[in-house]
Structure formats: structure tokens, C-alpha cells
Image: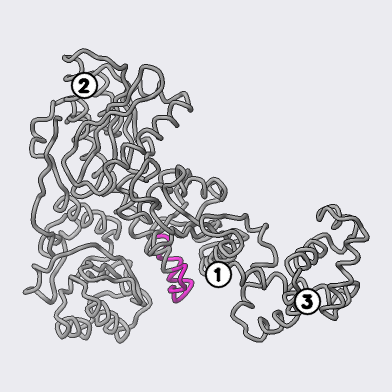
Amino acid sequence: MERLLLASNPGPVDVAACLRLSPFTSAKVLTGQDRLATPVSWTSVIEWPVEDFVSAGDLVVTTGMGCDEHRLRRMVKEIAAAGAAAICLCVGEGAPFDRVPEGVVAEAERTAVPLIKLRGRVRFSDVSRAVVQAIYARDAVYPRDIRELPPEFTRALLEEDGAVGVATVLENASGASAVVFDATMTVRGAGPAGRFWLADGARESALVAAMAELASSRWGQTTAAEVMIAPLAGDTEAMAVPAVVRDGTLGWVVAVRHRGEDEERDAITRRAVLHAGVAVAIELLRGVTEEEAAWHARTEFVLQVATGKMRSAQDLATRARVVGLAEDTRYAVGIALVHNPGPANGPDSPPVGMLSDPTRALARQLRRRLSHPASTVAAHGNEVLLCLHETDADWARVHKLAAGPPGWLTVSLGAADAPVELSGLALATEQARIALSVTRRLDGSGAFREPDQLGAFVVLHALLRDPAALDLADRVLAPLLAESRSPDLLHTLEVYLIENGNISSAARCLYLNRHSLIYRLRKIAQLTGRDLDRHDDRLLLDISLRLHRLRETG
């Protein structure tokens, strides 16, 4: 089988290499000149407080907003303690500090961290993008024979939409219908014949299903790319090759053709698909780099706001403008929780790229499906925070997109009940987290309910942490739970309360006659000592039942 070998470009990006990037043209190293060989693993754009937003190896960029000199010294100390590779402090025009305070320089010297002065008008997004691209370019795996690519493919990579260009060249070379997928099986481009072929939704769904099965067969493999075949309907088949980079698959190139091509045509198509796979690996790698760089500053800002780290309204307004968000735009807020990346093998396995880091892969997939530029998706741990413009706030659709094809991911989703401005993001995030918890308790993992379907359960969720309230609820229901027919009695009481005490309606829902229901209700009243005709007693029973349900399913 024909293979295309990939080789690694060795050597880490260090602080000195970052200083040679264009955004650092006017940079001045104030301390730590002997530590410029420290490797840089990522870039972090933060303001006070530091909290847990800095990781070891980060190149930290800040203006010191919200700090006086004493607090800025403390900030430098905490960043150094987190293991940062270097600190870039923007001073001058538009920045809180006109110059770097001497005490801050002394603290950086004491903690042995490189302190780099940047001019105030340097855009954080430019710094972040340049560093991230340098990291990806150094760490990426490139084909050994990249210079042997036909010139048509290399020219396609220079076009505005490289994936479409590569697919078009593949069609011209092979006569097949060409489609490019990313690792989440989202179409990233297609040639003219491929677009016509995908216009039939059923054919697109069948192709995605076939590609998912091929992707699962490569689970755990880090070998070079190889041509693979997937049968489709009728006399067609998909000839596919993964766009492999380092230890994962960024995407797939597919040529849909008729079965039974002669050997010469088959060899031409295979060679063209392999070349296209190399080109697409480069194109998707570039896309991931640009996407991560563009979103990095915004997602860190949104996470800080959502966790209540903004010290003032002025800080919020200033940083919102820096990352391109309008302070008065209203956002629908939700949290998606990724439970597992699906089975490790088999026809229902998700692509390798999603398995290796499912939360970040999910965040990328959702970003690409959003229509409004103000909508923001931020991955953190095993959660994805969604701050969506009203045009994107169709939560049922978002949940369907998040889960992907059956078996790929188990994703639970909770949403706040109303859109908020950025100043209300922290509270809305907590509301979304409560909605997520309640939904999981009621319906299990992988579920979603619209906020208006959760009702009083959201309010009662707080009582789950109140021992006195739980003890009272237990004592109210204890006589019913002790009965041998307790499930029947509890269900009868629940339906009766849901139907607002209407005996006829409740009897229909329970498939009982009125006399049987009345008998059960009298039994419930006798056991609990509560009067079902009295509002306060019905309310207490209702609250106790709902708390019991939340605890029972939690």
C-alpha cells in the first residue's frame, strides 16, 4: 500500500525565538537575559488577579490593569511561581503604566523570570497569534517530500480558501468528486463536483457515516498516512487519506469515484489523493494555528469574566474592547459537559482528533458552526462555556451539534434562563451550571432541557446543600416511603400535584377511576398527616417530592 512518511521538525520555541517575531520589534529585555533559552509552551494574556490562569511555560502578556505598583510586584511574583517562561509588560500610551516601576524590575530579578517591556500600542492578538504560530510550526510534523508536491497543490495552498483549492486540484487530477473534512467530520471544502455531490443530504450523511467508520479503524495509530477505501451506495466508493500531523489526524481528503477503475486510473487517483492529504494537513494545521491564536485572548477573557475575576466595570469595558466584544451585547449562556469520548474502537468511534482532546475539539467544532462573530466558545477542563449571540442561541441545535453522530461524545448541556450583558456573565454561568446539574440529576448524562422546562427544580437545587431542609423533606415523605406500595403512592401524589389538584385530570393521567384515586389520596393524607385541600400542605409535599427526586437521581 502506498504511504507518505511524515517527519518532525525538532527543537522547542524559546523566549529568544519569540523575541525575533515581528510583534516584539520594539521589545526590551529588562531582566532574565540568562534565561532566554527557556522553552515557551503557550501564550497567556491576563490581568490581575493571576489565580490559576498561568501554566508552566507560558509567555505571559499583561498591561497590569487593576494594579498599583505593590500589586503589580505581587502579580510578577505569582506569575513566576506558576513557572511562566517570561512576562511581557505593555507600558506607555494606552496602558495603565507609563514605564515599568523599579520595584517590579527588582521583583522580576529576585524571582529570576525574564521581564520584557513592550510598547503600549502592541495588540495582544498579534503577540498571541505570532507565538502560537511559531509553536505550531516548530512542533508540527511535515512530509519529507513536501517539495515534491505538484505545483498545482502548492499554488492551491496560497489561495484564500486552501481546502477548496486542494479539492479542486484533486478533482482535476483524478476525475473524482473531492471533499475535505476536518477531524470532527465537518466539511471544510469541496471541489465543484464534490459540492454537487454533497447537495444531496442523504449522500452527505452516508459519506460522514462511512468516514466515521474509517476514522475509528485508525484509533490509536500514529503511522504515516495511507489510502483507505469505504464502500458507498450503488457502484460508488470513497477513496480517503487522513491528513496526519504528529500523533493525530487533523482531517481527511476523500475522492468519491465509481468502483472498478482500471489500474492506471486507480494509480493516478491514489497518488493524487496522497498528495492532497499532504496539502490538506498543511492547510488544516495553518487553520488550527490561526483559529487558536484568534480565539485565545477572547476565551481567556470570557473565562475570567465568567469566574468573577474582573475587578471593576472599567476593567471589564476596556478588556472587552481589546478582544473585540461589545459590552452591551446580550449573550445567552450555557455550559456543555463532556463525559467521555465514545468507545475506543468500533464503527461508532469518533475521529482520533476528537478522542485525543475531546473538549477542545468540541469547542472548535461549535465555533465553526456559529454564525455571529460575537458568539464565543471557551474550553476549560471537561467543560465548554458558550456565550452566544441571540442568532446562535438555539440550544436544542447546539446540543445536537455538540454530541455529533451517535456514539461520538456524551455531552450534557445546561443553559441560563435569560440573555445577559457581559457584566452579568458570572451569574448567568452559575445559573447554567445549576441547570446542567439539575438536568443530569433528572435525565442522566447526555441530556438537555430548555431552561423553562426545569421550573422550580432550579430554585430547589440550592436546598440540596441545606441539611435542615433535606431533613424536613425526608420526614414529610418518610411515612409514604415506608409503605410497601410507596412507588404507587409517590407517583399518585406527584401526578395529583402536577394536575393542580384536579381529581378527574389526575385520574385520566394515572389510568384510574375517580374512586380509586380518591382512595389513594385519602391514604396519602392519613400517612403524612397533611391536608391535600390546604395550599401550604400541598406546597410542602410538592417541594419534598421534588427534592426527593433530585437526590434520588443525583
Q: Nearer the viewer, residue 270 or 431?
A: 270
Q: Nearer the viewer, residue 197 or 424?
A: 197
**In the image, residue 285 lies at what x, y percent?**
24, 44
Residue at 24% across, 24% down: 170
Which amino acid is tagged 2? Thr
**In the image, residue 144 lies at what x, y percent?**
8, 39
Q: Which residue is mark 3?
A: 540
**In the image, residue 403 lies at what x, y percent?**
47, 48
Tell me the quarter of the picture where residue 96 sits. bottom left
Q: Nearer the viewer, residue 420 or 151?
A: 151
Tell me the quarter of the picture where residue 549 sits. bottom right
Q: Which residue is mark 1?
A: 427
Question: With respect to residue 305, does 345 lie above or below?
Answer: above
Q: How much space separates mark 2 and mark 1, taking CA atoms?
A: 56 Å
Q: Which residue is mark 2?
A: 269
Q: Looking at the rendering, in which quadrant would you find the N terminus?
A: top left
Magenta run includes residue 318: yes
Q: Earlier in the sequence, mark 2 or mark 3?
A: 2
Q: Earlier in the sequence, mark 1 or mark 3?
A: 1
In screen coordinates, is 248 left or right of 457? left
Which amino acid is tagged 1? Leu
Q: Magenta segment, which residues?
A: 305-321
Colour pattern: one colour
In screen coordinates, is 524 left or right of 290? right
Residue 534, labelled with which disc?
none
Question: With respect to residue 218, does 507 lie above or below?
Answer: below
Q: Main secondary structure of the magenta part?
A: helix
What residue occupies the far left of the structure in this picture?
Answer: 34
